[in-house]
Amino acid sequence: MDLERAKGFIHDRRQGILATIRRDGRPQLTSVLFFLDDDGRVKISTTRPTAKVHNLRRDPRAVLHVSGSSFYEYVAIEGSVEFIEGGGILPELRRYYKRVAGEHPNWAEYDAAMIRDQRLLLSLSVDRAYGMLR
């Protein structure tokens, strides 16, 4: 599938299923909220102590499955994850929130929750895509 067509399909969608690889080779699936960023990468917010983060630190390969309006319409994006974390994470998490949910009523409260929850962003490259589109 053409990458631009796949990106066009996921551009206005926000819900998907992220597949990572467990230590024993089996897939680990997680429902996620995401957005396709202007840099062409998919951004996903998560917390540090999750299975997907542990899996991705060991093996950065992942697949994001995004469903369409019918059961048979979907796109799967394959790529590698980089982590956005550390000192500059709060502005990036705010940007993520705005893109996924809009304005927050209290950014100071939001920032405190992001620090308490040990939030970080996954940045998934779009290296390959497959699926079925109408």
Image (cartoon, rainbow, N blue to C red):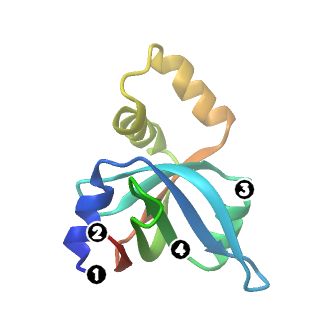
**In this picture, residue 26 sits left or right of residue 41:** right
Q: Nearer the viewer, mark 3 or mark 1?
A: 1
Instruction: Report the residue that reaches farthest toward the top.
Output: 105
Q: Residues within 10 Å of mark 1 (few under 14, many from 20)?
A: few
Q: Is disc 1 in contact with disc 2, using a CB cutoff of under 8 Å?
A: yes
Q: Which residue is mark 3?
A: 50
Q: Which residue is mark 1?
A: 1
Going by the numbered disc 1, the residue's amino acid type is Met
| Image position of 125 with respect to 24: above or below | above
For numbered disc 1, what is the local secondary structure?
loop
Mark 1 or mark 2: whose residue is earlier in sequence: 1
- Residue 29 coordinates in the image, percent (x, y): 66, 65
Q: Residues within 10 Å of mark 2 (few under 14, many from 20)?
A: many
Going by the numbered disc 3, the residue's amino acid type is Thr
For numbered disc 4, what is the local secondary structure?
strand
- Distance from the alpha carbon under mark 4 to that under mark 2: 16 Å
Q: Which residue is mark 2?
A: 6
Q: Which mark is residue 32?
A: none
Mark 3 or mark 4: whose residue is earlier in sequence: 3
- Residue at 73% of width from left, 77% of height from top? 22
Q: Is disc 3 in contact with disc 2, using a CB cutoff of under 8 Å?
A: no
- Residue at 55% of width from left, 60% of height from top? 17
Q: Residues within 10 Å of mark 4 (few under 14, many from 20)?
A: many
Mark 1 or mark 4: whose residue is earlier in sequence: 1
Q: Residues within 10 Å of mark 3 (few under 14, many from 20)?
A: few
- Residue at 51% of width from left, 72% of height from top? 63
